[in-house]
């Protein structure tokens, strides 16, 4: 597209130094045609003898840019435009591929979106701006002028309640109570739903080409912690008689702990474990659960643990089971990589086969209230790979979960959890509104301060991740050749079992800021952790400081899955030379202590 807006701002057309009146009028007609502006408006602005004031020139230039933005949105079928195509120097090629369904334009890079996290100007579509104006009319009694004197740091809204209008009617968008609506929390949810779907992020390509919801928006809900987000996700399926959760064999221990210690009183919940790195094992396991023939061993299938306290009669026509396929990539703490796209595709094919075989008709009775519930919900815990590295929704997942406490907050001062559901899949569209209902009615919402801190963290996420991934790669290579280290787990190493999957799935050769390594036994591992000086001994991850933790000693005693000599490392922003020296010194001290 030709840069029509630059024609107006070019001084030679303002002052007529090198142009005739005919040339200017011809350009006026072209501008009016493109932006659908009144002829008189543009004629006044481009007159060769224009003597408008500086203020008027600024207003008109801004209005023209807004008209250009609206025109670009219309051409992009309502997709977001942060920076107009006319002024962008870094364009992605648009091949008109029907499979690339995004909620955003093809021009913007994720670094720009992250840097502007929380800003209201240049982020809204035409409809969103109109909606926001309605909100301002209802809440503040006047229409706030968007894009004028907007704060360049997101405001922190601490109010817990809002004044009721004199007529007693809050209106469709009226704010009542901060549990149901907080502007700071809404701002974080909006940017996260955008980041999970924007094309300017990592490699992605698995949208449903036949989907008619291309312009639907992802739904994000912010919770008071990562575990609150995970629990709320399962609670959003509480209207289903039976839920079966399939977990990876290597995952954050908090999820099975919650299933066993708290949700065991929840009706009909079961769970099982499978090696998520083996697509065929996952497919066989899902098939077995669908057929209700899950058995011990074989094809990577472990025992199914039923801890539901209430039996459901076999003859109950609504006795359906929904499967929650819970992926974690990279996994905690062994850094296993799950091929998200392959598993989601395999599960989709399997469900289609089951429907063709008549299973769906038996499991979803035509008179059942659960008829529209999907058979399987795919969830990805992508805490170790934020949207700048991996976007699971664009790989076919129904929902993605983040502990915002980690990389999104990024400074070890936030307690936050986030779940975003896909607008592109049946499971995502089913889960989204139910998740928001649980968030509002159960009240486990993220605090406004934590949301504000997370917005601040997003603004530097890309810079921190690039540094942390680069340092993690250097440390992994260093430790891999260290004589006192038995094994290193990091997907960036070429000998990692899923290195090829990581190269395809994770963006720009960024393999994450987490790694783990093993020494001889738990005694030596404890000694190494005790001897570090630059790194700190602590749980959690994703902050600016490097953290080292002996995982086996912190996991539940009856469910230890980490190797005894394993140390998990969350790489911070320190000098890689200082970290190498620190770990090398700690390894030698531990060796000397344990050799006495």
Image (spheres, rainbow, N blue to C red):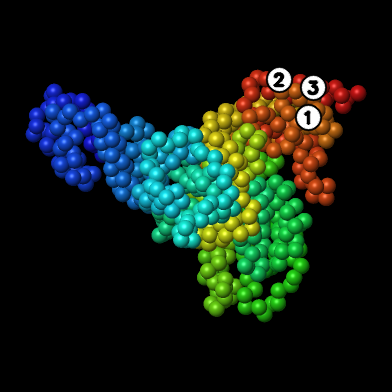
Q: Quadrant of residue 105?
A: top left
- 3 vs 2, front mark: 2
Q: Earlier in the sequence, mark 3 or mark 2?
A: 2
Identify the residue at image location x=61%, y=35%.
410
Residue that label 1 marks:
529
* Mark 3, secondary structure of its residue: helix
Residue that label 2 marks:
581
Is the residue under label 2 in contact with that under label 3 (CB below 8 Å)? no
Q: Position of residue 480 (x, y in %)?
A: 69, 29
Q: Earlier in the sequence, mark 1 or mark 2?
A: 1
User: Between marks 3 and 2, how big is the CA–CA gap?
Assistant: 11 Å
Instruction: Report the residue that reaches farthest toward the right.
Output: 596
Q: Position of residue 125 (x, y in %)?
A: 38, 47
Q: Which mark is residue 539?
A: none
Q: Position of residue 59 (x, y in %)?
A: 28, 35
Q: Quadrant of the N terminus?
A: top left
């Amino acid at each position: 597209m030709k840069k029509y807006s630059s024609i107006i701002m070019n001084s030679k057309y303002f002052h007529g130094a090198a142009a005739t009146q005919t040339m200017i009028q011809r350009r006026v007609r072209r501008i009016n045609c493109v932006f659908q502006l009144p002829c008189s408006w543009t004629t006044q602005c481009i007159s060769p003898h224009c003597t408008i004031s500086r203020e008027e020139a600024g207003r008109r230039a801004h209005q023209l840019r807004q008209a250009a933005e609206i025109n670009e949105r219309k051409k992009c079928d309502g997709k977001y435009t942060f920076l107009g195509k006319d002024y962008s120097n870094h364009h992605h090629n648009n091949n008109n591929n029907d499979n690339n369904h995004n909620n955003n334009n093809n021009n913007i890079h994720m670094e720009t979106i992250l840097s502007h996290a929380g800003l209201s100007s240049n982020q809204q579509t035409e409809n969103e701006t109109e909606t926001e104006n309605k909100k301002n009319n209802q809440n503040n009694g006047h229409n706030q002028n968007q894009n004028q004197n907007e704060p360049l740091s997101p405001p922190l809204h601490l109010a817990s309640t809002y004044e009721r209008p004199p007529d007693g009617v809050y209106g469709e968008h009226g704010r009542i109570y901060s549990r149901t609506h907080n502007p700071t929390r809404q701002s974080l949810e909006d940017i996260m739903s955008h980041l999970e779907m924007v094309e300017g992020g990592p490699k992605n390509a698995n949208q449903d080409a036949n989907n008619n919801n291309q312009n639907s928006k992802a739904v994000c809900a912010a919770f008071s912690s990562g575990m609150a987000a995970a629990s709320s996700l399962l609670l959003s399926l509480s209207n289903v008689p039976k839920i079966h959760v399939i977990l990876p064999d290597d995952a954050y221990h908090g999820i099975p702990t919650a299933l066993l210690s708290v949700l065991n009183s929840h009706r009909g919940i079961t769970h099982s474990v499978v090696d998520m790195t083996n697509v065929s094992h996952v497919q066989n396991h899902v098939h077995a659960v669908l057929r209700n023939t899950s058995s011990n061993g074989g094809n990577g299938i472990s025992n199914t643990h039923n801890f539901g306290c209430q039996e459901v009669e076999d003859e109950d026509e609504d006795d359906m089971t929904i499967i929650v396929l819970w992926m974690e990539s990279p996994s905690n703490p062994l850094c296993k990589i799950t091929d998200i796209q392959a598993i989601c595709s395999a599960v989709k094919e399997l469900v289609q086969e089951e429907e063709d075989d008549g299973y769906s008709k038996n499991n979803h009775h035509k008179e059942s209230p659960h008829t529209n519930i999907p058979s399987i919900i795919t969830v990805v815990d992508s805490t170790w790979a934020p949207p700048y590295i991996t976007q699971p929704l664009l790989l076919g997942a129904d929902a993605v979960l983040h502990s915002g406490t980690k990389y999104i907050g990024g400074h070890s001062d936030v307690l936050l959890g986030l779940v975003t559901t896909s607008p592109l899949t049946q499971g995502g569209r089913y889960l989204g509104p139910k998740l928001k209902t649980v968030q509002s009615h159960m009240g486990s919402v993220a605090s406004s301060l934590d949301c504000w801190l997370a917005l601040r963290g997003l603004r530097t996420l890309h810079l921190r991740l690039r540094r942390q991934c680069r340092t993690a790669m250097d440390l992994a290579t260093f430790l891999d050749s260290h004589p006192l280290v038995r094994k290193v787990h990091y997907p960036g190493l070429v000998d990692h079992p899923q290195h090829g999957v990581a190269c395809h799935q994770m963006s720009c050769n960024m393999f994450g800021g987490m790694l783990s390594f093993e020494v001889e036994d738990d005694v030596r591992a404890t000694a190494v952790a005790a001897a570090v000086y630059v790194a700190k001994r602590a749980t959690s991850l994703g902050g600016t400081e490097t953290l080292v933790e002996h995982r086996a000693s912190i996991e539940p005693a009856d469910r230890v899955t980490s190797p005894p000599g394993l140390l998990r490392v969350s790489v911070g922003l320190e000098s890689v030379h200082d970290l190498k020296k620190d770990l090398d010194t700690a390894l030698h001290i531990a060796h000397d202590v344990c050799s006495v």
